[in-house]
Image (tube, rainbow, N blue to C red):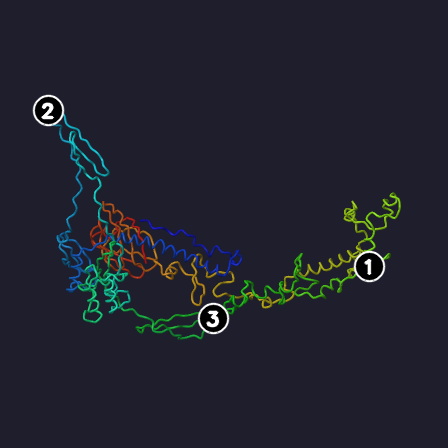
């Protein structure tokens, strides 16, 4: 079975802008989600795809692994008699017995007579191939004319009769439906017999739960755990044994079990179960822990190294040094709750000018035609005096009514008089006089003059003077007013150009005045460039107090509590035995390794092997029938066989693929 590979693109953080807020729509919540996205993709792949596939593969492999009851019984008897103390053993077939000895020992002891391992009678073999055609016999006499065969088909029944007969002999072409097969559903370890709920203890409550299961009132996740007499079913006897064990009158469970074995329940698809026992390894040496860590020298002064001493529980010690770096210029993480108190998404004061906002300081309906950065050389809040300094009157300009000698506004009386004149009225002059433009003394709408606009646009500003930039007066002509405005614009443009070109902070504005961060500051362990560390492509996790940290792929898998996988190949060296072990170093502590046995070049096809850490692996169907002794030390998994290179999966020049789980 080929395992599905993870093809998702995990280069998520590296694809972000160097300054993430520049990405359209990027928020703090979305940025946090980006850091989790790669890890969640890995978690979803492992939990949703890889683990189910591995479970199927493991069930297929385990269904091929069987331990003969005679071997298990012999091992158990040797264990109880003291002949076998739980140390690693080697097995061999001498042609008459399966024999054992301690690893590295010299004496082989008979374990099981080979003739006793005969299984049940096998099914009848397939029909052999048809033999060669014999020589042609002598031609016989011509027989009587035979009768033909007649047949009929009714449903699934075929009827046959000889020509002339009236009745058919029927045969049903469809046989009876076979019984449903019974496969392995799962294999579950029994941590403690009698413990119905996995609490780690056996009490009267477990006896009650076993009784309720026996009566059909409840279901149990691991009912084999309360089958303490190991007969494949839960009965009142099991309930009694569990109750007696909880009261101390029965001292050990399971009843009739063998000490020194780890028991597993094999559940089948029809709901039944059976048990297998695997010998436990020898107890490891007592470990040592840390008793204390104390500062033994140093004052934490910047630029110096402090020395700490670790004292272990066995009274041994070791020391290590911690360099004290210089104090940073920052004062801790800058929190959103501090710089954006109204949760508007904009840094406080950055949306205001001297405490004023557009919403409160600009009149409703105001129209902005350009961006004003300064007025008369001043930035910030603009006062009326700043506007007057440009030559704009401090008071509203007023106009008088027009007179015969001065231009002005039309009075109400003049308006009334004009409204009283009928349209097209004349003063009794002839049409020749009235139509003569030279005789017109009134006003005429510009729209009625065909060349008015073109004439005005084409008029040259002859006599325009920019000598004065004083305030425009009501008595000024348009030509004079334009000259004053041009003089004011020229003067202000020079000042404005000089000011806008000054990048030296001419107003001495500070970061605190605009609510900005200082030039040199830190956000936890994130640099001003937005980097965490210096290694490309690592997943990010939150550490102590929520600080972001990068982890290696292996550490990230451990943090997620996920199964770790490593694949590879090794090439056989042509050696075998205890002193020529095969070794593979994994990037993590290995638990299980699958090895493809391959072909050794001598017509021997070795079956795939499943090696379990610190256990004995028996050969499957088609293999040698011998064992591999497997051990794990740290990240190194080792195995050997004493019968030959092909049995140890180490034939010279053969490439062996493997998959390691941890």
Q: How crowded is mark 3: few (under 14 residues within 10 Å), some or many (20 or more)?
A: few
Q: What SS does tag 1 mark?
A: loop
Which quadrant of the view contains residue 110? bottom left
Residue 462's label in the rendered image is none
Q: Residue at x 20, y 55 (%)?
A: 67
Q: What SS does tag 3 mark?
A: loop
2 vs 1, front mark: 1
Which quadrant of the view contains residue 485? bottom right
Where residue 388 appears, as percent x and y from the top left, is: 74, 64
Residue marked by disc 3? 303
Q: Residues within 10 Å of mark 2 (few under 14, many from 20)?
A: few
Q: Which residue is drawn at 26% across and 47% down?
A: 599
Where residue 356 appears, as percent x and y from the top left, is: 63, 66
Describe residue 395's horizontal placement relative to residue 616 as left or right: right
Q: Distance between the residues labelled 3 and 1?
A: 86 Å
Q: Nearer the viewer, residue 393 or 333?
A: 393
Q: What SS does tag 2 mark?
A: loop
Q: How far apart are marks 3 and 2 (CA)?
A: 122 Å
3 vs 2, front mark: 2
Name which of mark 2 and mark 1 comes first in the sequence: 2
* Quadrant occupied by the C terminus: bottom left
Residue marked by disc 2? 141
Q: How crowded is mark 1: few (under 14 residues within 10 Å), some or many (20 or more)?
A: few
Q: Nearer the viewer, residue 12 or 164?
A: 164
3 vs 1, front mark: 1
Name which of mark 3 and mark 2 comes first in the sequence: 2
Residue marked by disc 1? 401
Residue 479, placed above or below residue 250: above
Q: Distance between the residues labelled 2 and 1?
A: 154 Å
């Amino acid at each position: 079975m080929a395992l599905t590979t993870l093809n998702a693109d995990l280069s998520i953080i590296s694809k972000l802008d160097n300054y993430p807020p520049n990405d359209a729509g990027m928020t703090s919540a979305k940025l946090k989600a980006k850091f989790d996205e790669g890890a969640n993709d890995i978690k979803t792949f492992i939990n949703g795809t890889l683990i189910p596939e591995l479970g199927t593969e493991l069930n297929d492999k385990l269904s091929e692994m069987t331990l003969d009851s005679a071997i298990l019984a012999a091992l158990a008897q040797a264990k109880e008699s003291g002949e076998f103390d739980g140390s690693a053993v080697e097995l061999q077939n001498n042609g008459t017995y399966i024999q054992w000895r301690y690893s590295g020992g010299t004496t082989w002891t008979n374990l099981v007579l080979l003739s006793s391992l005969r299984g049940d009678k096998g099914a009848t073999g397939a029909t052999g191939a048809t033999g060669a055609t014999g020589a042609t016999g002598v031609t016989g006499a011509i027989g009587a004319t035979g009768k033909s065969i007649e047949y009929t088909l009714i449903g699934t029944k075929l009827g046959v009769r000889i020509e002339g007969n009236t009745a058919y002999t029927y045969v049903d072409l469809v046989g009876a439906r076979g019984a449903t097969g019974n496969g392995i559903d799962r294999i579950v370890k029994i941590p403690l017999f009698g413990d119905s709920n996995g609490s780690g203890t056996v009490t009267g409550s477990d006896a009650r739960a076993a009784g309720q299961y026996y009566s059909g009132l409840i279901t149990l996740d691991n009912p084999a755990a309360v089958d303490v007499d190991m007969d494949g079913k839960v009965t009142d006897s099991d309930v009694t044994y569990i109750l007696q064990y909880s009261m101390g009158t029965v001292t050990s469970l399971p009843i009739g079990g063998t000490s020194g074995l780890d028991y597993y329940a094999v559940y089948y698809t029809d709901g039944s179960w059976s048990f297998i026992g695997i010998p436990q390894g020898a107890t490891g040496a007592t470990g040592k822990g840390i008793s204390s860590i104390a500062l033994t020298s140093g004052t934490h002064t910047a630029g110096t190294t402090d020395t700490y001493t670790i004292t272990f529980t066995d009274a041994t010690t070791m020391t290590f040094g911690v360099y004290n770096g210089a104090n940073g210029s920052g004062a801790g993480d800058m929190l959103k709750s501090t710089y954006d108190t109204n949760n508007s998404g904009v840094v406080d004061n950055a949306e205001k000018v001297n405490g004023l906002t557009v919403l409160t300081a600009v009149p409703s309906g105001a129209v902005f035609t350009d961006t004003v950065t300064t007025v008369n050389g001043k930035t910030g809040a603009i006062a009326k005096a700043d506007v007057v300094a440009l030559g704009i009157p401090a008071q509203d300009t007023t106009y008088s009514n027009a007179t015969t000698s001065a231009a002005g506004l039309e009075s109400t009386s003049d308006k009334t008089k004009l409204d009283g004149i009928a349209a097209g009225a004349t003063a009794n002059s002839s049409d020749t006089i009235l139509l003569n433009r030279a005789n017109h003394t009134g006003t005429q709408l510009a729209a009625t003059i065909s060349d008015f606009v073109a004439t005005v646009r084409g008029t040259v500003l002859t006599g325009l003077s920019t000598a004065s930039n004083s305030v425009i007066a009501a008595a000024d002509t348009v030509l004079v007013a334009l000259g004053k405005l041009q003089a004011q614009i020229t003067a202000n443009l020079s000042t404005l150009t000089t000011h806008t070109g000054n990048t030296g902070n001419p107003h001495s504005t500070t970061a605190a005045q605009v609510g900005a961060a200082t030039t040199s500051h830190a956000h936890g362990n994130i640099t001003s460039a937005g980097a965490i560390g210096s290694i490309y492509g690592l997943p990010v996790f939150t550490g102590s107090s929520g600080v972001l940290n990068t982890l290696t792929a292996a550490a990230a898998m451990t943090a997620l509590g996920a199964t770790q996988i490593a694949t590879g190949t090794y090439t056989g060296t042509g050696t075998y035995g205890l002193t020529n072990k095969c070794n593979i170093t994994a990037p993590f502590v290995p638990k299980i390794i699958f090895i493809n046995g391959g072909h050794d070049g001598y017509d021997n096809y070795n079956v795939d092997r499943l090696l379990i850490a610190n256990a004995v692996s028996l050969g499957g169907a088609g293999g040698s029938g011998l064992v591999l002794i497997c051990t794990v030390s740290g990240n190194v998994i080792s195995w050997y066989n004493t019968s030959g290179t092909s049995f140890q999966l180490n034939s010279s020049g053969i490439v062996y693929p493997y998959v390691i789980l941890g």
